[in-house]
Structure formats: structure tokens, C-alpha cells
Image (cartoon, helix red, strand yellow):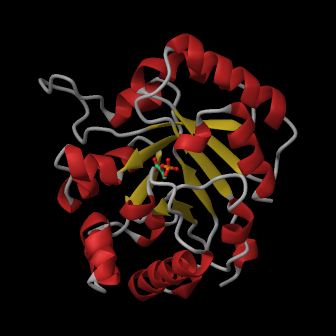
Amino acid sequence: MNKGLRRPIIAGNWKMYKTVKEGEELVNGLKRELYKVTDVDVVVCPPFTLLVNISDMLLETNIGLGAQDTFWEEEGAYTGEVSAKMLKDAGCQYVIIGHSERRQFFDETDESVNKKIFAALKNALTPIVCVGENLSEREKGIAFDVIKKQLDGGFKGVSEVDIEKIVIAYEPVWAIGTGKVATPEQAQEAHKYIRGWLSKAYGTDIACKIRIQYGGSVKPDNIKGLMANEDIDGALVGGASLKVETFTAIVMNSR
Ligand code: PEP
């Protein structure tokens, strides 16, 4: 559906990896290799402790900066949390919300995802909102029901104007960090379902503009096959974003 309207976006989710020094080395390598890339949005999402330094390193580059989570309140007695206002202040333009690891290990729910989306938007951050089914849900044939519930709950009350500011990441949980990538057909089918949901909720013109990334064991040798599909507009990359060579190759092969 009008793929040309959507600029590809490749984001690296570093998860809980990299010290300050290691992160700086990675970013220096990416700056060196990717400075000529102007036709793809490239984003890195390091741990909180690296954000300020990396934000300085990325000034006047074509690489964007994202965080891996946010809390929904702006400030207050919430020990251990970081707000969207703070992320903006630290130099972020993006924030990942609802990653399956947050849903699995930290009690993230569709309701908390919804509140975090509003907090991100209020602070002019682009939310990268993750949805996706686990293995047993896929095997039971209820993958799309699960995705629908996550979309219904996550985007509750999000306006037509705001939905255009959001990136969605379809990440089948069974493919994350397992080396088991979804086939391009499986991924396209789910992306088409998500775009159909967007069409129903917001109309086709808006649905055509929203970028949907695939995530789950994306590597330099499978990104091309994924990107060849009509509704796949980029990737959210975990493991392969931790090395200059592999992340660079994914960006290059996505074009
Ligand atoms: C992720 O962290 O969102 C992810 C998709 O990880 P991996 O690429 O390692 O499967």
C-alpha cells in the first residue's frame, strides 16, 4: 500500500549491553560507515546511562537517538524511573514502548503502553510501539487476535494527528533473540493485518503513511527479503545492532 510514501527506518535496540566506552566506539564506527546514508532513518537506542554522551556524539549527524522505555509521569517520587521529559532533555528523538521483554519481565500492559505513548507524544518523542504474539499464541492460531488487542489497548484515544507520528514494530516474540526469523511471508501477513487495523481505525490515507518495522533476528542476510514486501518499512534490530559491521550491513541492505 503506497510504500513509496514511507521512508525506511532501521533502529538498533542495544538492550542492556555496552558500557559508555563500548557505546562510544560503536557510535564512532556507525558515524564513519553511515555518514553518506540519507535515504533511511537510522536510529540507535542505547541504555539510559549512555544517552547524554551519545546525544552529543550524534549532533549534526544523520543518526537519531532513542531510549528503550519511559515512564508516563513527568517527575515525582518514582524511584528508578525516567520520564519522557528527561529523555527529550537528554537528546532523544525516539523511544521504544511496549517491547516484549518489558511485557514479559516488567509487567508492561496495554494500559501502561497507552500512557507511555501519550507521555512520549507530549514531549515530542516518536514512540516506536512494539506488538507481537508469542509462540504458543501463533501455534494456537490467535496471533492476530493478540496483535489486535495490543493495538486496541495501546492506541486507545490516540488522535488522527498523533497516530501519524508513531512507528509500529511488529516483533513476533518467538523470533526475538532466537535466530528464528519470521519468513518474509509471515512478516508481510502480520504487517498487512496491522495496516488494515490502522485503515479501519484512522482511514486508508493515514494508514498508508505509518511505518511498520519488523523485528526478530534481523541480520544482514535476511533484511533484503523482508524489505521487499509491500508493508515492511524497516527493522527494529537487537543482537545485530551491537556491532558496526552487522548494523551497517543491515542499513545498507535495507535500501
Ligand atoms: C529486539 O530487541 O527488538 C530484537 C528484535 O532482537 P533480535 O534482533 O536480537 O531478535
**Residue most extreme to the left:** 77
Query: Which percent across, then down, holds residue 91?
Result: 53, 27
Query: Which percent across, then down, holds residue 129?
Result: 41, 57
**Residue most extreme to the top:** 21
Asked if 113 appears above or below 22 in the picture, the reply is: below
209 left or right of 178 in image: right
56 left or right of 156 in image: right
| Residue sitting at x 71%, y 70% | 225
Query: Which percent across, then down, holds residue 126?
Result: 49, 49
Which corner quadrant of the image does residue 152 belong to?
A: bottom left
The quarter in which the C terminus is drawn is bottom right
The quarter in which the N terminus is drawn is bottom right
- In the foreground, 160 or 255: 255
Residue 146 visible at all: yes
- In the foreground, 128 or 29: 29
| Residue sitting at x 64%, y 51% | 10
Asked if 103 appears above or below 175 in the picture, the reply is: above
| Residue sitting at x 41%, y 88% | 200
Query: Which percent across, then down, holds residue 14?
Result: 50, 35
- In the foreground, 157 or 246: 246
Query: How many callouts does the rendering have?
Result: 0
| Residue sitting at x 70%, y 68% | 227
